[in-house]
Image (cartoon, helix red, strand yellow):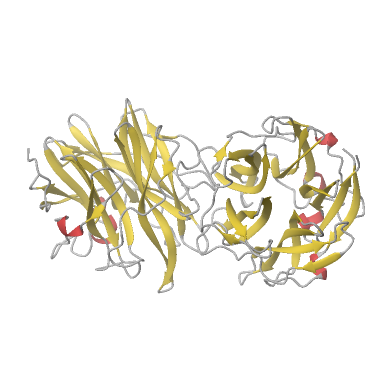
Amino acid sequence: MNTLPAREFRWKKLGKVFDPTRVEGPEWMKEFAQAPSVLIFDDFIRVYFSCRPLPDKNGQYVSYTGYVDLDRNNLFDVVNISERPILDLGATGTFDEFGIYPVSVIRNGDEILAFYGGWTRCESVPFNVSIGLAVSRDHGETFTRLGNGPVLTHSVHEPFIISGPKIRFYNGMWHLWYIAGRRWIESGGRMEPVYKIRKAHSNDGIHWEKEDRDLIPDKLDENEAQASPDVFYFREQYHMFYCYRHGTDYRGPRGYRIGYASSDNLTDWIRDDSTVGLDISDSGWDNESIAYPHVFELDGQIFMFYLGNQVGRYGFGLAQLENA
Amino acid sequence: MKWKKLGKIFDPREHKLPNNCFAFAQSPQTLVFDDFVRVYFSTREKDSTEKYLSHISFVDFSKNFEKILEVSENAVIPLGNAGCFDEHGIFPLNILKVSDKLLGYICGWSRRTSVSVETAIGLAVSDDDGLTFRRIGDGPVLSASLHEPFLVGDPFVQIYDGLYHMWYIYGTRWFRHSEAAPPDRVYKIGHAASADGFSWKKTGKQLIADKLNSDECQALPTVIRFNDQYHMFFCYRQAIGFREKKDSAYRIGYASSHDLINWVRDDASAGLDTSAGQWDSDMLCYPHVFHCDGNVYMLYNGNEFGRFGFGLALLDH
């Protein structure tokens, strides 16, 4: 193994892995395969993602979370697709009544924990999000909520949209990276949310203490939206891949790009997007935007799942780190 | 307890209120000064969609409550920003004076699509003796959690033995009593404690046992200490039929405690009931109990949730 941190990552794009619009999937999995999160088994890897049935008569979507199992020796070989969502939508009036998206999973002994964004619909703005927790005792096929309410929600300086959880366990403690809404801005007749990457920690995974500060300085401007803070530890350093976009008019080329920051101590992060080593393609499924990175190690190799155009409407793809 | 009703003391229709408010003076909450008593209340305007927005106003009374000295001419606190917990209403605003600080605990309302509303509790401070309040941040200090999934509201904060105590309500379920009906809600009284009034730890249990049934709705706890005991007044009602049926509407409940955590409910001791033919003939709700010049008073709302104002009662020791 190398001993020095890479100054610049070199990712080789391997192509799209799963496209929900190209399979004869269930009704709840017609479009989108968003925010992939990996759980590794002996013979396969399970990739959780969030998907949607066709919109209702008012054009509104709900999100469910399911998974595909990929052959551990050939990640382009889909060996299984979940028959049911891993979790039903929440009861009337609860925080997760209209969507379970995104999801981040982690093993905890024999159990598997899923932290997820739960969506509710509002009147003046389209939605709000809080983070919920569910547990699986059947190897991640189905999950049960710990309660009908969230484990992480709005607070004085994080007034709405607590979403995008990424759960990790480092140094005997639970760490949860997430995004927190900052403001809603009106643009072209729509209300668009601005959100920033933040973090909380916990001894038990249920009671969380927020750090209450932005982790990643803005690059574009104050309305930059940051998402998917995916932290990965290797070579004695913490690496965060995330995505960021413009605050308005982002459905197209002003959409998400993947950014990068590093830390030695989980507290101080240095943003350096120039080293990320992954950009949009000249053509194809990811030629407008790339989003929701998830980095994992498998059999000595380092991979990244990520979304292409329209934030995963047509599935997710895979890249491999060449200079690992 | 024995209360002497002193009648309705404020009718919002008789005054010009800021924010285009035209009716309702709900959930009166006091700030007692040396020479007058300021009573904050929630009053309503209608927005362009004919839905209500609740705003905070106040009225200043002489200390014997026989004279209205002033009614607020300006907004006490603006409603929250787009997408925030208090965007569509503040109801109520509970005031706590802590040495030289004046804290206002906000019950903020924001509209939802599948249910009518969600609430959470925020914090604001005043630097001008309560004429105006400004939020410490756009978000809440107490909101939904794993086992209190929605409708955290109705804060009432007091400091006892150096610790901040908040009594509040939390929702337990939304349900439809018929297919055509919009969802109705059920909520219960809870408690949280804090060393600084800002960071709160929930006790995590229903404080007051149900009397009517498990769908009983309990609201607006107010706590006072006298005779070496803590006394809580609150209001409670049936989950359905509470707007139109007198027998299902809000009544005043009562519980007592020696330790602020364990409460014994005894509504028969509340000592306040409806008065036939009066402004409070069908409903009693949103009690607020306080000390003033050696007396213990209760402010409360009557029929139609305080549409026509609030009244006062004096505890007969």
Q: In this view, does B49 lie to the left or right of A142?
A: right
When the figure is inspected, residue A187 is found, relative to residue A143, above or below; the finding is: below
Q: Depth check: A217 or B20 in front?
A: A217
Q: Looking at the picture, how far across and down is residue B244, in whole percent? A: 78, 52
When the figure is inspected, residue A72 is found, relative to residue B241, above or below; the finding is: above
Q: Name which quarter of the figure residue A114 lies in.
A: top left
Q: Looking at the picture, how far across and down is residue B273, in whole percent? A: 87, 44
**Extreme residue toward the top, this view:** A110
Give me the residue at 21% from left, 45% from top: A295
Give me the residue at 42% from left, 57% from top: A181
Q: In which quarter of the image is the C terminus of chain B?
A: top right
Give me the residue at 64% from left, 40% from top: B165
Q: Depth check: B200 or B182 in front?
A: B200
Q: Is residue A271 left or right of residue A92?
A: left
Residue B293 showing in the rendered view: yes
Q: Is residue A13 left or right of residue A183?
A: left
Q: Looking at the picture, how far across and down is residue B203, in whole percent? A: 59, 34
**Extreme residue toward the front, this view:** B100
Q: Looking at the picture, how far across and down is residue B7, in whole percent? A: 89, 55
Q: Quadrant of the N terminus of chain B?
A: top right
Q: Depth check: A302 or A1 in front?
A: A1
Residue B116 showing in the rendered view: no
How many marks the image carries: the answer is 0
